[in-house]
Image (spheres, rainbow, N blue to C red):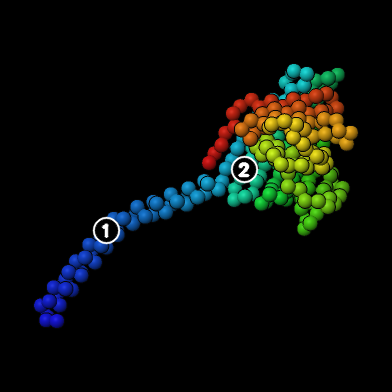
Amino acid sequence: MNSQFFVKYQLRNNYFSTKDLGYRKKLWPLFILLFFSFLLGSFSAQSKEMTSKYDLEMLGAKIGEFTVTQKNENGNVNIEAITDVKVNLIFSYRVKYVQNTEYEQGVLKHSNVKTYKNGKLNSDMSLRQEKDAYLLVVDGDTTVINDLITYSGSMLYFNEPQGVERLYKERTAEMRQITTLSEHTYVVNDEKKRELNRYVYKDGILEYAKMRHALGMLELKRVIENTTND
């Protein structure tokens, strides 16, 4: 190879290398933008939050409100449900339930239900998984529940119980059978096969519920459209 050809060869290579470097500098911000767009898209696909509100009625009169929010992230579910009830009988009183439940990969890990009467804490119930069992603590008293819970009352609002046979009720620490009454309608019965609760769904979300209570039949009616943040 003669020296003149070698110099021309090196100059040409340096030219294209410098040119490519310029293109890379221009394209680098675009690569960064695409990278972070991909990360944000992946995060959004794995994370979702839903909220619904309901009126609570008895004998056709509104006695309270119920709000539930469910957050799904990477297969884990966190649910917060708040019930605010005001009852006027011989005397008036106000009851508020604050309920939090955590699921990991389809298994209940922890739940807590606090009950307030007239603004003061009346009861505190928590459930936590410990290895193959659960520790139930009610106002300081501890009980062991040897079971695996994969569906509970907190799940009823955004997770239609298709194919579900058992329901754990966080507020009463009971395990109940749940059965399909008709399409998108489910019932929970007591030991004598009497109907306790009925749940009706639309598009996979609880639309209406009827629940037997010591004071009478309670009705839960969805009042606003569900909002989803993706």
- Helix, strand or loop at label 2? It is strand
Asked whether the viewer can see residue 96, the reply is no
Identify which residue, 89 or 109, lies in the foreground: 109
Q: Is residue 75 left or right of residue 64?
A: left
Q: As drawn, which residue projects farthest toward the right?
A: 192
**Quadrant of image for the N terminus:** bottom left
Instruction: Give the mark nearest the N terminus, 1 or 2.
Output: 1
Tag 1: residue type? Tyr
Q: Position of residue 77 (x, y in %)?
A: 65, 46
Q: Which mark is residue 53?
A: none
Q: Residues within 10 Å of mark 1 (few under 14, many from 20)?
A: few
Measuring from the top left, give residue 148's x and y in whole percent. Answer: 77, 51
Residue 153 visible in the snapshot: yes
Side (left or right) of 72 relative to 155: left
At 79% from the left edge and 34% from the top edge, which residue is drawn? Answer: 188
Q: Is residue 13 above or below residue 117?
A: below
Question: Which of the 4 quarters of the picture holds residue 177?
Answer: top right
Question: Which quadrant would residue 51 be assigned to in this image?
Answer: top right
Distance between the alpha carbons at the discs numbered 1 and 2: 43 Å
Q: Which mark is residue 71?
A: 2
Give the answer, above or below, for where 126 lies relative to 27: above
Task: Identify which residue is drawn at 78% across, 31% down.
Answer: 197
Q: Position of residue 78 (x, y in %)?
A: 66, 45
> Within 10 angstroms of label 2, few (less than 14), some, or many (20 or more) residues?
some
**Residue tagged by mark 1?**
23
Examine the image and state in which quarter residue 56 appears.
Answer: top right
Q: Residue at x 87, y 47 (%)?
A: 141
**As shown in the figure, which amino acid type bears the numbered disc 2?**
Lys
* In the displayed structure image, the side of residue 193 where residue 56 appears, left or right: left
